[in-house]
Image (cartoon, helix red, strand yellow):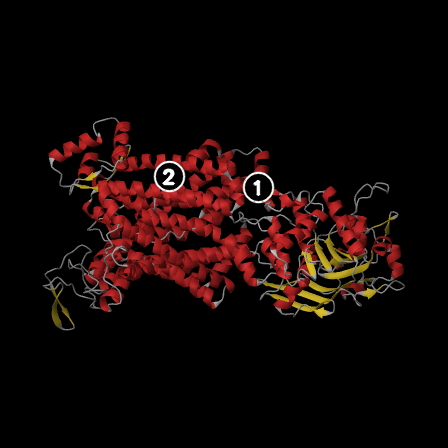
Amino acid sequence: MSPIVLSSSETLAADTPSPHGERHRRVALRRLLHDRVAIGSVIVFALIVIACLCAPLYAKYVAGTGPNDNHVTEVIRVGGRPTDVVSTSGIPIGPTWQSKFLLGADSNGRDVAVRLLYGGRTSLMIGFLAAAITLTFGTLTGILAGFFRGWTDTVLSRALDVIWAYPVVLLGIALGTALELGGLKLGPLVISGNSLFVPALIIGFVFIPYLARPIRTQVLLLREREFVAAARLLGKGSMSIIVSEVLPNVTSAVVVFVPLIVANAILLEAGLSYLGAGVQAPNPSWGTMIASGVALITSTPSLLFAPVIMLVATTVSMNLFGESLRNAIGTTTSMAGR
Amino acid sequence: MARYIARRLVSSLVVLFLVSVFTFLIFQVIPNGSPALRIAGRGASPATLAAVVKEWGFNQPIYVQYADMMEKIFTGSVVSYSGNINVLGQLRAGLPATVSLAVGASVIWLSGAIVIGVISSRRIGGTVDRLMGVLASVSISVPVYVIGAVALYFLAYKVSIFPNGGYVPISQSFFGWLDHMILPWLCLSVGFIGLYSRVLRSSIIETEGEDFVRTAKAKGLTKRRILVHHVLRTSMIPIISLWGLDFAGVIGGGAILIETLFNLQGVGQYAAESIGLLDIPPIMVIVMYGTFFVVLLTTAVDILHAFAEPRVRLQV
Amino acid sequence: MTGPLLEVEELRVGFSSDRGVVQAVEDVSLELDEGELVCIVGESGCGKSVTALTIMGLTRSPTTRIEGSVRYEGSELLDAPESQLRAVRGPGIAIVFQEPVTSLNPVQRVGPQIAEQIRAHTTLDKAETRQQVIESMRRLGIPQPEQRWYAYPHELSGGMCQRVMIAMAMSCSPRLLIADECTTALDVTIQAQILLQLRSLCDDHGIGVLLITHDLGVVAEVADRVVVLYNGRVVEQGTVRSIFEDPQHPYTWGLLGSMPRLDRPRREQLLTIPGAPPEPGTAGGGCSFLARCPHAFDRCLEEPPLAPVPGASARESARCWLTPDERRHLRMVGGDIGLAPAGDVG
């Protein structure tokens, strides 16, 4: 499985809570804007997102076909000669570098380029949605557990420990297969097994402890700081303290995690879909495309490389950006030895 | 120290119990639809369905269902209805391959990570360090099954340096075993080396800024002694914890993707095949055992950690 | 041995950061003989710790620019190869830091940490080393050293850790001990004991001690000579008597005047030095104390040199354009030495 990139709670806990404030933010932003790797990766990522968003446009105007349209028996002209889209022995055509079947076809005669873009939409949507779930619930849980301690902390921490105990892929598979047949039922809310919300919910859920635990540790440290004590003396209630004192300080830690979580969510979705426990056929996703690509690697390697390149480009750019972000926010003063 | 161990054990028992409950919830409670149908599989006959309902207690209250499920899983009597095979037996058969994969890979990835982490930390920001950083980012972004597929394609199919998948038990032939495991080991290790080397590098950089390292220099110790005896001893500690978690994860079936690709017939591959067939019982058992193993191993690693890092014993 | 034990000449240390080079030390020169206890005094950020660390070679890095000369027993240390520096650290010069608990390796017991230094510089075997360590721990007043050998740093109090640090520093019988604010983190009674021990190292064993502090009380207690640092420069130096009875620089007057005294009638308000200590490396032209000095005049726009005090011994000097007569007059505020409040000046 693709290993989890998020730092262990030990590594983050070793950082003292960083100061929040205008100057800090501006210095970090300046650093970021000067970092060529950061700019490059943001541009690459943005291009990928835009391309995938334009999937319907590409499908309609360039390729003239949808992601699920089969053309198994069709014949097209390549370089002036008529060729089978899928040969009689079941081998699909490779990249034609023309507007139709730009990157070739898969064993069902579907246009790879179109599927690639639609699959990107799916994978990215699930990735972002999952990341949003993780960020929201992870931060919430971490702050509540760290700030209120006592029973709230015990209960929440145990819950986080349980989720954390499962190897990520195993939990994803468990939830994925369990929910596949009938879907999800949360009280009155029923989500169909085929819906894209299911993988998003699963992936978002699985990563919650990876964010919540470091946040909790940070909040535990922040609680003891003077400005919290000062706010309390001023008579501020807990909720108000959380919003005005704790949240801004936790934000820089959370911000650093965002690209990491997005990248991991996308990777996990690809992994689960590859195994068949994520996005279900015929919905395209980079994971499912990679699965079929692996099977046909000996005959049509392009089927594998196309989604792989897209996936790798997306996650690498996210990870590199994450590292640049960490460097930018990490230290605003650098006096050796003091 | 004894108190710390006791506390740790108690808390892991609690977690184990909660894991069993949660697994139960995942498979029998949360999803919509008939649990019996899920367990029995897609093409189940009405007779099989009735048998499932009876054995698993689906017409009984929830806590009875839970008890039944636990009993079945831990007495090894879970049967996969699509082929009428005992799950535990299949699991046992796949264990040697999975263990070989985990042990070999973890040795390689730990040593690789240490070497690269230390080298990168010598000249921070230098060309080697930046190069390693980019390579690390790439290695954790490329899915492990892709690395595996590409490796298989080039090194086993096109050029027959390595065999095209399959597993040879060590009892049968040491070199055959080695030959079949090298590629899976390397593929699994790549991502981990990328991650661990960066974590170690950060840990080393952080440790080197600590006061006690300054003292070590002031004592007139050699650079090597400072690095090995002071810096590494401290900065390796977070790595060991991570390592325990990941090692357990691989054994628990996390290396599903590699096993499937290389046809190692391990526990992970069994899980993958079950997914394809939507055969729930094996997945249930693997998830339960796998997670239990993770909890137990991380508890052991934490206790070892406390031996190495005395301040931890004061923590709750 | 003839000549001073330690000579620092026109030391300049600058650190590169995002915002350019920060000069932590602009121009520091001092000398120290064996058996002498010299105090470096100054506020935070004046460069005193950086000076101490640079003497030990602990500030060497690609981003640090060090100029000037540091000579120990006549040999230059600043450009010495690492191997030579390593040989000096321990048997030659040793240092004790401000935070004793974090200055010790947290995952190692304290006994072996002291032993490590001995083993690095001598050929004693394990048993002999352990003996020596226990002996030095005992001499420093650490009770039950045989058991304390097995303690972890976090199990010991601050004062005990500092004694361990001193034992470690003294373990190879250095001729020069640098103590960098080593009592700042301790409470007053322990501080007194440690200072006494440092003093006896000078008197009884002929060891040179360079004590860095911001506390004039400590200076009065143990110093032979004093070097006053401000904004990376030496602004005054002299014997402890001359600094307290005949201070030459307005900054020194300010330091003395701001100390509450039990033996003098109480003022209505404590005298403070107006303004705030400068950020390291923010040097304008002119005297570095210009912005805060109520006695500044037009000549002060040009930086004064460190000039010897006329009629005093060779090692007394001050960096100020005022004449000795003017100084004697201006430093008296309400019958005591101090810095006149701004606006109160003729």
Query: Across the whole image, how many numbered discs are drawn on residues?
Result: 2
The residue beneath circle 1 is A225
- Asked if disc 2 and disc 1 are in contact, CB closer than 8 Å, the reply is no
Residue A235 horizontal/vertical position (percent): 57, 32
Residue placed at 19% from the left, 56% from the top?
A66
- Residue type marked 2: Val
Residue A216 lies, with reference to residue C3, above or below; the image says above
- Label 1 packing within 10 angstroms: few (<14), some (14-19), many (20+): few
Q: Is residue B214 left or right of residue B97?
A: right
- Residue type marked 1: Arg
Residue A235 lies, with reference to residue A2, above or below; the image says above
Determine whether the residue tagged by mark 2 lies in a helix, strand or loop: helix
Residue B48 lies, with reference to residue C325, above or below; the image says above
Q: Chain of mark 2?
A: A
Residue B313 horizontal/vertical position (percent): 51, 41
Q: Chain of mark 1?
A: A
- Label 2 packing within 10 angstroms: few (<14), some (14-19), many (20+): many
Mark 2 vs mark 1, CA separation in Å = 30 Å
Q: Quadrant of residue C93?
A: bottom right
The residue beneath circle 2 is A162
Determine whether the residue tagged by mark 1 lies in a helix, strand or loop: loop
